[in-house]
Each structure stands twice: as C-alpha cells, then as structure tokens.
Image (tube, grey):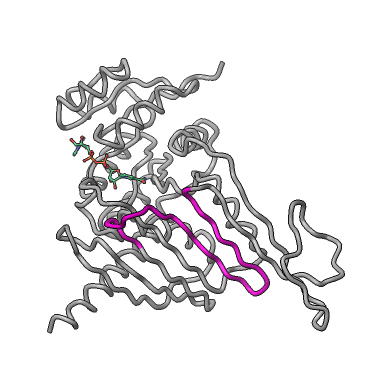
Amino acid sequence: MAVKLRYGVIGCGHLGRFHVQKAAALDNVELVGLFDIDGEKGRSAADANQTHAFAEVEELLAEVDAVSIVVPTETHHQEGMRALEAGKHVLLEKPIAVSVSEGEELTNLAARQDVKLQIGHIERFNPACAGLRLLPETPRFIEGHRLSQFNPRGLDVAVIFDLMIHDIDLILSLVDAEVTEVHASAVAVISDKPDIANARLRFANGTVANLTASRISVQKMRKLRLFARDNYVSIDFLQKKGEHFLLAETDATDIPDGYFSAAEYAPTGRRILFGALSYPDCDMLTEEIKSFVDAVQNDRPVVVSGREATAALKVALQIEKSAREGLDRVVT
Ligand SMILES: NC(=O)c1ccc[n+]([C@@H]2O[C@H](COP(=O)([O-])OP(=O)(O)OC[C@H]3O[C@@H](n4cnc5c(N)ncnc54)[C@H](O)[C@@H]3O)[C@@H](O)[C@H]2O)c1
C-alpha cells in the first residue's frame, strides 16, 4: 500500500472538528494530531478522534506533511505562511485571507516552496456543479441566491466573504473574462457587518451576474441560474437538483437522453427541450480533503488554487467597497 500522508489540523472549532473527523477516516491519511490555540478545544477534538493535541503549532508542523488550517479568517495569512514556510502542503479554509496582498503572498510562497496550497471553496465539490458545465457557451446572464438562516457563527466577516464568495468563485471558474464593473448594496441588520448583500458584476465579455446573499433569511436557498443564447440552466445546490432548457430544431434527432419537448412552434421550426437534473448526494468535505490529498500524493493541480481564491477575494472586496460607498452616499 502507498505511504500514508502524515496529516494535521490547525484550528478545531466548528468546522475544524469536521476536518479532523474526515481526515481521520481516509485510508491514505495518517492523522498525526491537531493544534488549537484554545487548549481545551484542542484536547476535546483530539479525544473525540483518538488523536494527539499538540501544545505548540510548531511541534505539530514538525511531524506532518500536510495540514488543514481552519482558524478565523483574520489569522489565515499568519497560520498559512507559518505552515508554508515549514514546507508543508496546506488546505486553507476560505476566504483565502483578508486582503489581496495577503492572498498573493500565500500563493507565491507555496510556489516558491513547491508545495500545494488549496483553498476551501467547498461548493466546487458539490456534485450539482456538473450542471453548470451543461452550458455549451459562456453564460450571458447569471442570477445567484445564497440565503441562510441566522447563526451567530461567522459574523467576524461580512456575508460577502462568508456566503457570497462561494458564488463569486463558481462564477469566476465559469466566465473566462475580467470583472470590469461592480455595483453593490449591503446592509448590516443584526451584526455590525453586512448581513445581506446584492451585487451586480459585469465582465469584459459582456456577461452580467446578479448575486444576492443573506445570513438572516427564514429559509435556506443556494441557487444559480445561468442564461446563455440557446440554453438555460438552473441549479439548486442544496437539493442537488436542476433544470436544463435548450432550444432545438423541431426536426432535430439528437435529443439528450431523458429530455423531452416542452414546447414547439412549427412556423419557426424551433422547440424547447427540457431535462430534469439530479445528482447523487455526497460528503463534500470528505471529497475536498480527498482531492487535496490526491493532489499532494500524485503531484496533481489542486481544484481551487491560491490564485483563483485570491481572484474571488478581490471581487468580494470590490463588492464590499461598492456597497460601503453606496451606504455612505445614502447616509450623507
Ligand atoms: N468552506 C466553508 O463553507 C466554511 C464554512 C464555515 C467556516 N469556514 C471557514 O473556516 C474557518 C473557521 O470557521 P469556524 O466556523 O470553524 O470558526 P470557529 O470560531 O468555530 O473555530 C475557529 C477555531 O480556531 C481556533 N484558533 C484561533 N486562532 C488560532 C490560531 N492562531 N491557531 C490555532 N487555532 C486557532 C479557535 O480557538 C477556534 O477553535 C473560517 O475561516 C471560516 O471562514 C468555511
């Protein structure tokens, strides 16, 4: 059997405990231990997973090949740089950091050290992402809704960095063009950082994306709708379902399996085909860690690089700035 990857987890709060649990369950990983700045949290996560809680982060780093870093966002840069400087492969939670320069420093250091740096944009591992690739061309218009019920966790950052950044990352992975215009509004309702935000992004190729994120909604929703010239795809990331409508000639015979004619109009010779999309559920965090481990062990590119995550952060920061300027205008 191949040599197991010696693995550690830094930060064992709400999400870090899941990283510990999932890494411990992988056959090709040896969970060496964990570290949390709060010793009690570290010991409790270690006990629950029959592993060792290190007293110092440097001691853990000395014993491992790779780490998950699951600490609050403002310390991503500090802890990421420390692990990369020690020559370790890093799976760092999203958002990559608090500034573009921090994101670039992390990305550049990983390249210099010749180690893998993957960022935890977990939605890329949602099986429903396969639906996004059904569009044969770049979408012209995208509508995104990512709404969550209130939860006091994650309030250290605006909803743009907490929720909307998942959709920003997905859209940047689909639209191969620069963002040229950003118009946003955001409101801090219950916390002291924006809890609801809406952003309209225009890309250099003409694509427009309209994104809404909220962490004070009554119901959860995670949907992207993509419109191209002859195709419309709607993806529900929560239900792992979707819908695909596409335009075809009435006499076309190459109808995809499972699709049927929803409407047809003889004078134009056109019809609309419809296909219901459904994807098997999976444990997305396990898939994310597995792909990181695979990238390290088989020297493959990571699924979400530091460069991509920094690009998503840059757009998120532009959204925050536009929203702040808009609010300033309202206030004065
Ligand atoms: N990918 C996602 O969808 C997703 C979801 C939730 C959270 N996150 C990200 O995960 C990170 C952690 O979120 P959380 O909800 O688990 O937070 P949390 O507050 O529950 O846990 C953070 C833990 O890190 C520890 N910690 C703080 N500074 C540390 C340091 N320097 N070294 C070691 N440990 C330290 C704290 O004691 C705490 O136990 C955040 O960056 C957040 O954005 C991502």
Residue 219 lies in magenta, yes or no?
A: yes
Count of marks overlaid on the render:
0
Residue closest to the eye, 319 or 275: 275
Residue closest to the eye, 224 or 75: 224
Q: Which residue is depicted at the point 18% across and 26% down?
A: 56
The picture places residue 326, in percent across and down from the top left corner, at 24, 79
The picture places residue 250, in percent across and down from the top left corner, at 83, 71
Q: Which residue is depicted at the point 23% across and 28% down?
A: 35
Residue 6 as seen in the image, left or right of residue 124: left
The picture places residue 241, in percent across and down from the top left corner, at 56, 50
Quadrant location of the C terminus in the rendered image: bottom left
- Magenta-tinted stretch: 213-238
Residue 18 lies in magenta, yes or no?
A: no
Q: Which residue is depicted at the point 43% across and 45% down?
A: 122
Quadrant location of the N terminus in the rendered image: top right
Is residue 299 placed above or below 187 in the rendered structure? above
Residue closest to the eye, 7 or 27: 27
Indicate the quadrant of ligand 1 in the picture. top left
Locate residue 328: give its quadrant.
bottom left
Residue closest to the eye, 34 or 197: 197
The picture places residue 142, in percent across and down from the top left corner, at 50, 69
Is residue 9 placed above or below 278 in the rendered structure? above
Is residue 315 placed above or below 42 in the rendered structure? below
Residue 310 as seen in the image, left or right of residue 294: left
Q: Which residue is depicted at the point 74% across and 56% down?
A: 259
